[in-house]
């Protein structure tokens, strides 16, 4: 009596493997599509590690259509007062100029805030402060870290 060699059928294993791969691909597609359609609403502007800021602390301003917002105090300086030497912005920049070697200014610019940005940039440069700026989407909410903390609340 001759023995027949034992044969192993891999069809059930390959079938289960194909179903698992198909399920994983479907899961990846669903997660990718949901993350692409979700829009960021809160954005934090951070100083880049590679920037030449010499260890200075950033101070944040936000240029909008109605004026400039000083962060983290959320104080609005109306655009009509920007040219004044006694405005809150002028006082703020004068205080920063006294600490100019330890701080610099980052400006978030909204799409409707470019006229305001031109005036603010001129004043910051006139004060002799280092400046950085970032275009900012109208729908995003600006998240400014509180001094002493590395991220937003």
Image (cartoon, rainbow, N blue to C red):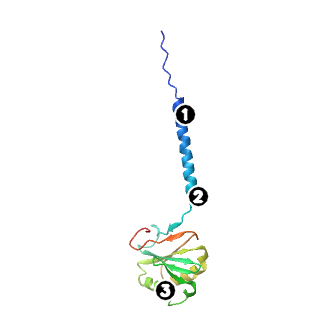
Seen from the viewer's position, the closer of residues 115 and 122 is 115
Numbered disc 1: secondary structure: helix
Report the residue at 54% width, 47% height from top.
27
Q: How far apart are marks 3 and 2 (CA)?
A: 40 Å
Q: Residues within 10 Å of mark 2 (few under 14, many from 20)?
A: few
Q: Name the residue under label 3.
A: 88
Seen from the viewer's position, the closer of residues 111 and 41 is 41
Quadrant of the snapshot with the C terminus: bottom left
Q: Where is residue 69 in the image (x, y as percent from the top left)?
A: 51, 79
Q: Residues within 10 Å of mark 3 (few under 14, many from 20)?
A: some
Q: Where is residue 133 in the image (x, y as percent from the top left)?
A: 53, 74
Sequence-wise, the earlier of marks 1 and 2 is 1
Q: Do the residues labelled 3 and 2 touch (CB within 8 Å)?
A: no
Q: Distance between the residues labelled 1 and 3?
A: 71 Å
* Image mark for residue 15: 1
Seen from the viewer's position, the closer of residues 79 and 55 is 79
36 in relation to 5, above or below: below
Report the residue at 51% width, 71% height from top.
142
Report the residue at 51% width, 85% height from top.
126
Quarter where residue 122 is shown: bottom right
Report the residue at 51% width, 88% height from top.
87
Numbered disc 3: secondary structure: helix
Quarter where residue 148 is shown: bottom left
Q: Mark 2 points at which residue?
A: 37
Q: Are marks 1 and 3 in contact (CB under 8 Å)?
A: no
> So how many labels did they put on this image?
3
């Amino acid at each position: 009596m001759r023995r027949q060699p034992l044969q192993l059928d891999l069809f059930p294993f390959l079938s289960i493997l194909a179903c698992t791969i198909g399920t994983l691909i479907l899961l990846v597609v669903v997660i990718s599509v949901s993350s692409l359609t979700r829009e960021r609403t809160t954005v934090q502007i951070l100083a880049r590690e590679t920037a030449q800021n010499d260890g200075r602390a950033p101070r944040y301003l936000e240029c909008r259509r109605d004026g400039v917002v000083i962060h983290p105090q959320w104080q609005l300086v109306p655009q009509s007062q920007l040219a004044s030497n006694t405005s809150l912005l002028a006082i703020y920049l004068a205080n920063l100029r006294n600490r100019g070697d330890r701080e610099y200014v980052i400006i978030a610019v909204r799409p409707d805030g470019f006229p305001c940005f031109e005036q603010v940039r001129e004043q910051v440069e006139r004060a002799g402060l280092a400046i950085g700026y970032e275009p900012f989407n109208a729908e995003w909410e600006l998240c400014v870290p509180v001094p002493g903390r590395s991220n937003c609340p």
